[in-house]
């Protein structure tokens, strides 16, 4: 299994859309994918038609065992999605209470890694949608992943969020055996606006080594897919957004292959 986390310490940058678009394209290609919603807001869970306010069981259940994960529990929590090859580990609003409950508990930072280890042979890819705040949930996402995708809206304030995310990653890397590789993905790009053009130029000047050189454009078809509860490629396989995400997936898989060879 390959595990990717999608994270940024700023909301509204396209994290959930990026997670689901990549998962959908992998599933379209025949891969078995599990998507993990670690954001208490539950955007990914809602996207696929499940109510995070009403779910009796969710990812929250994984954190209730002193850092251990009972055998079979991750599998029991899986929910269906609009795509037959994508399963969902859902979020619930209870996750928002985790930070208050977790002080003094050792080992909580590896709960997601232990959970995905139980699903390792059943899925080819896992994609984790992370919360926009540094805490035990984001730490779990980063600790479990082999590659980090950082969507960055092409506007100035989002770049400030990127700076915080890169600082957080540097902190997390100090506790890892190997530094977590990451790819910055410009999102919500509108070539008609000076803000988008200037931000893309700034990203290329400041983060060249880790920046995907293309971008995800503003595309209303992505929003339409969300409203329909299906992956973007299920909704419109030839939309501008899906074409861009297909190029991004090819780039990420190429990086993965290069890392394996190295």
Image: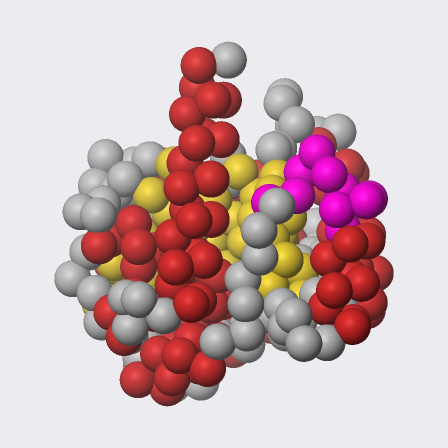
Q: What percent of the width, then of the height, locates residue 169?
A: 72, 42
* Residue at position x 24%, y 69% in the image: 234
Q: What percent of the width, then of the height, locates residue 15?
A: 55, 64
Q: Nearer the viewer, residue 146 or 184?
A: 184
* Residue at position x 21%, y 41% in the image: 122
Where residue 183 sits, quadrant-wise, is top right
Residue 210 in view (yes/no): yes
Task: Specify the segment rendered in magenta.
Answer: 203-212
Quick check: 96 left or right of 126? Answer: right
Where residue 101 sits, quadrant-wise, is bottom right
Residue 168 in view (yes/no): no
Q: Is residue 51 above or below residue 232?
A: below
- Residue, far front: 192
Quadrant occupied by the N terminus: top left
- Residue, far top: 262
Quick check: 83 left or right of 206? Answer: left
Q: Is residue 78 above or below residue 81?
A: above
Residue 209 part of the magenta segment: yes
Q: Nearer the viewer, residue 62 or 192?
A: 192
Residue 108 part of the magenta segment: no
Quick check: 37 left or right of 72? Answer: right
Q: What percent of the width, then of the height, locates residue 220?
A: 46, 82
């Amino acid at each position: 299994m390959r595990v990717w986390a999608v994270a940024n310490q700023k909301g509204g940058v396209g994290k959930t859309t990026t997670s689901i678009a990549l998962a959908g394209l992998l599933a379209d290609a025949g891969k078995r994918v599990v998507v993990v919603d670690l954001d208490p807001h539950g955007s990914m869970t809602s996207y696929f038609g499940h109510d995070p306010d009403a779910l009796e069981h969710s990812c929250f259940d994984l954190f209730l065992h002193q850092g251990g994960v009972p055998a079979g529990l991750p599998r029991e929590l899986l929910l269906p999605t609009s795509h037959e090859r994508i399963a969902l580990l859902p979020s619930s609003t209870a996750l928002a209470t985790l930070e208050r409950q977790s002080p003094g508990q050792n080992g909580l930072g590896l709960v997601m890694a232990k959970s995905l280890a139980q699903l390792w042979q059943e899925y080819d890819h896992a994609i984790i949608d992370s919360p926009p705040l540094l805490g035990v949930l984001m730490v779990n996402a980063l600790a479990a992943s082999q590659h980090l995708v950082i969507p960055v809206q092409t506007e100035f304030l989002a770049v400030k969020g990127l700076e915080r995310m890169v600082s957080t990653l540097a902190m997390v890397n100090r506790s890892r055996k190997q530094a977590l590789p990451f790819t910055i993905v410009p999102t919500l790009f509108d070539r008609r606006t000076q803000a988008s053009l200037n931000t893309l130029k700034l990203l290329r000047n400041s983060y060249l080594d880790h920046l995907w050189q293309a971008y995800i454009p503003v595309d209303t078809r992505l929003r339409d897919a969300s409203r329909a509860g299906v992956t973007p490629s299920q909704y419109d396989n030839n939309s501008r957004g899906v074409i861009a995400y297909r190029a991004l997936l090819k780039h990420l898989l190429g990086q993965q292959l290069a890392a394996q060879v190295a």
